[in-house]
Amino acid sequence: MGNTNYITAIELSSSKVSGAVGIEAYDGIKILATASTPVDRFISKGVVRNVDETSKAINCIINSLEASLDNVSIKKAYIAFAGLTVHSIPSKITKGFDEHTKITPEIINDLAMENDDTFQCPAGYTRVQVVNQEYKLDGKVDTNPIGAPTRTIEGNYLNIVIKEQYLKQLNDSFEQARIEIADSFSAARMDADILLSKDARRNGCALVNIGADTTTIAIYNNDILRMLTVLPLGSHNITMDLCAGQLSLDEAEEIKITRGYKSPGKETTPIDSELVNSIINARMSEILQNVRYQVEESGELIGHIIFTGGGSKLKNIELLLEEFLPNFRTEVISEPQFSLVGSSGVNLNGIFTTALYGLLKKGKENCCEETKKETSKIVVEQDIFGGSNDVNENEVTEEVKPKEPEMSKEEKRRLEKEEKERKKEEERQRKEEQRRIKEEQKRIREEQRRNSPGLFDAIIDKFKKGTKDFIGQVTDDEKDEDYDDEN
């Protein structure tokens, strides 16, 4: 391996766990291996719900990556933290002087340390990152105050927090998988590093990542992150509503992606364009109106909103952006702002999210170790004439694998019992999810009846012909925490 740093990046999202190994190239990143595995509700709204299942998914990714590399063992990984409870809280520290005093690096460090000591994190949350904002010298904004004399200095900071229990569950998943976390970064900031140009961040913009279960909003101005929040709304809500029209989960997902909004022509599937449009319009209006509200509430002068994520790939999404965000310049971006190449045979399609790109670029520490194949000793029997069989001992090698210990009967019974309990819990959660979806669809019907009685009657006829058939998992506390955790 020499002096080459092999960077491993792993991202856990609500739809999949993905990973990659790359090395720094002269013009970007060279990808050596990629892997992806779907998530079956053990990660929901970006939050690890089941540590055991998540650790298995991580091991699956690691094994797949190692199989694509020659004699390399992965020991560490860079990861991105995200999820429903991630948000920012501003704070400021003021320091006064008896006379005009020149600002030194020590004074700046003292302000930052005082912010670390005095910031009061909300109960149940922990701070994971602090972003320096601008400073104010005698009331005037200064982004580079070192060397300037002043009587007072005010330091402004943006504190990124996450629910402590959720962060622990994320860390426990990697610990159980025996993969050390080299470092962790905000997924929203990784998105921005990859997708936003310097001019966009300096002039003021909002980066909106529409995921399966959540929508993340990061607002930039003067090249500084000003606000970060996560909404409990995502494009998977469209899929679940389409399922009520006599469609399977896969069929509904395909219609959402391929047909999209205001699709013309005669439809041959069990659900027609009018119903598709009404569902997509209703769900996307929820997301886009909340995006507009968050941008306006931030107090930043933002005229440019950039969309990314799986939900931004909805066909004809531009029509919805024009309808619900008429006063903003909008665009959809998915390509990184730097060169990315793959080794021969490496699949780059459908694997990456922009946060995964960012982790590969951000990582500096070598995450892999070289493994060796040991030579096996071969005992060669002599023939009756005193010679030996024609075997060259130096040519016979094999990879030494540790022998797995046999499982005891008690351990087997314990695992069988745990498996039965897990299946029982899954069935309970499935029924609970069915009940939740039924209540949500009832709410949608009542809202549509109030807003458009004629169209609602036609939609109801379509729903009555359909069936609700899906399997999903949610936790008992998910319904209560959706909006509470956001705040």
Image (cartoon, rainbow, N blue to C red):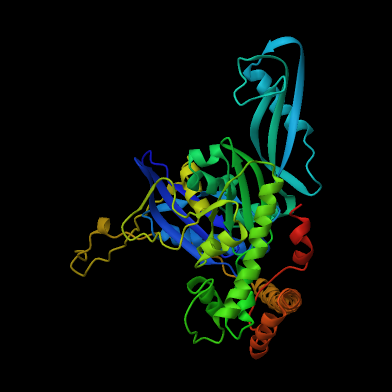
Tell me which residue sits at (67%, 81%) in the image: 455
Residue 39: % across, % down: 58, 67
Q: Quadrant of the N terminus?
A: top left
Q: Quadrant of residue 223?
A: top right
Can residue 41 be seen from the camera position used here? Answer: no
149 or 408: which is nearer to us?
Answer: 149
Residue in the image at 62% along x and 20% along y? 145
Of residues 334 and 111, which is closer to you in this image?
Answer: 334
Question: Image height check: is 311 above or below 203?
Answer: below
Q: Position of residue 96 (x, y in %)?
A: 77, 17
| Percent position of residue 472, x then y | 65, 74
At horizontal 78% and vertical 42% (from top left) the residue drawn is: 121
Q: Would residue 423 be found to the left or right of residue 315 on screen?
A: right
Relative side of 112 to 354, left or right:
right
Q: Residue furthest top?
A: 99
- Using the image as rendered, state which of residue 381 and residue 224 is in the foreground: 224
Q: Is residue 453 visible?
A: yes
| Labels in figure, total | 0
Give the residue at the far right of this rendering. 123
In front here: 356 or 269? 269
Residue at (60%, 38%) from the top-left corner?
A: 221
Query: Measured from the top left, where is residue 101 in percent x and y?
Result: 69, 11
Residue ranking furthest to the bottom? 465
Does residue 174 lie above or below 235 as drawn?
above
